[in-house]
Image: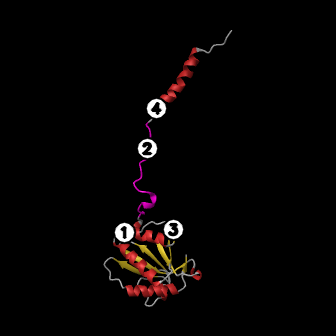
């Protein structure tokens, strides 16, 4: 005698694949990803609190220029001017962006890894930090909690003494830099 499969079992076995297929068809399909308007390299960097651009750590002129370009409003023009003054004053100046701030260092292997100046954007001003500013003459006006550091705050409507800034940059580049 041949064995036969009971009808009930056959019906359940035949329905199971139909239920799975019907179940997956009733689920909503995912929408296709939206096309990006700009490539990642063309996107504007995020601005952190106070308007400071969020730029990835990097060495050389390119990350510093990206930071300056991302500075909001009037600050970008001032940033370009500060960069140009520093480059003109210190031939071969080294540049980097670390901790969302451009850093400037004197050229030469003895100065490798040390920095004499940084910029940082705040809501209403740009802060220039001279890491050995207490040794500069005259001493920059902004005091710091660190004994050697002095600041120069540049606001939109402030008169900016380029000659004094250039003198400070020249002096700062000749002092031992800050290792960071």
Report the disc number at residue 144: none
Category of crowding for the residue at label 1, using alpha-carbon neighbours closer than 10 angstroms: few (below 14), some (14–19), many (at least 20): some
Pointer 1 residue: 72
Q: Residues within 10 Å of mark 3 (few under 14, many from 20)?
A: some
3D distance between C-alphas at marks 3 and 1:
19 Å
* Horizontal and vertical percent position of residue 47: 41, 65
Disc 2, SS:
loop
How far apart are the two marked residues, 4 and 3, measured between alpha carbons?
48 Å
Give the CA distance from mark 1 to mark 4. Answer: 50 Å
Quadrant placement of the C terminus: bottom right
Magenta span: 28-46
Q: Where is mark 2, residue-wise?
A: 32
Please identify the residue farthest to the right as the structure is shown: 1
Residue shown at 67% from the left, 11% from the top: 2
Q: CA distance from mark 2 to mark 1?
A: 34 Å
The first of marks 2 and 1 along the sequence is 2
Instruction: Give the prevailing secondary structure in the magenta stretch.
Output: loop
Question: CB under 8 Å between callouts 2 and 3?
Answer: no
21 shown above or below 156: above
In the image, 91: left or right of 6? left
Across and down, in percent, residue 114 comes to: 55, 79
Q: Is 34 placed left or right of 109 in the picture?
A: left
* Disc 4 target residue: 25
Magenta stretch holds residue 59: no
Q: Residues within 10 Å of mark 4 (few under 14, many from 20)?
A: few
Instruction: Using the image, tell me which numbered label, if any, was put on residue 57.
Output: 3
């Amino acid at each position: 005698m041949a064995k036969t499969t009971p009808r009930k079992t056959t019906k359940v076995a035949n329905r199971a694949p139909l239920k799975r297929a019907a179940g997956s068809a009733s689920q909503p399909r995912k929408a296709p990803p939206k096309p990006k308007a700009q490539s990642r390299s063309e996107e504007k960097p995020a601005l952190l609190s106070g308007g400071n651009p969020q730029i990835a750590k990097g060495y050389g002129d390119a990350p510093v220029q990206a930071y300056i370009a991302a500075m909001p409003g009037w600050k970008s023009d001032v940033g370009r001017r500060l960069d140009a003054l520093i480059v003109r004053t210190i031939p071969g100046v080294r540049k980097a962006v670390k901790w969302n701030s451009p850093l400037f260092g004197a050229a030469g292997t003895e100065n490798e890894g040390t920095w004499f100046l940084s910029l940082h954007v705040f809501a209403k001003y740009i802060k220039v930090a001279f890491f050995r500013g207490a040794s500069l003459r005259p001493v920059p006006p902004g005091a710091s909690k660190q004994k050697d550091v002095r600041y120069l705050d540049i606001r939109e409507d402030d008169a900016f003494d380029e000659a004094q800034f250039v003198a400070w940059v020249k002096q700062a580049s000749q002092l031992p830099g800050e290792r960071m």
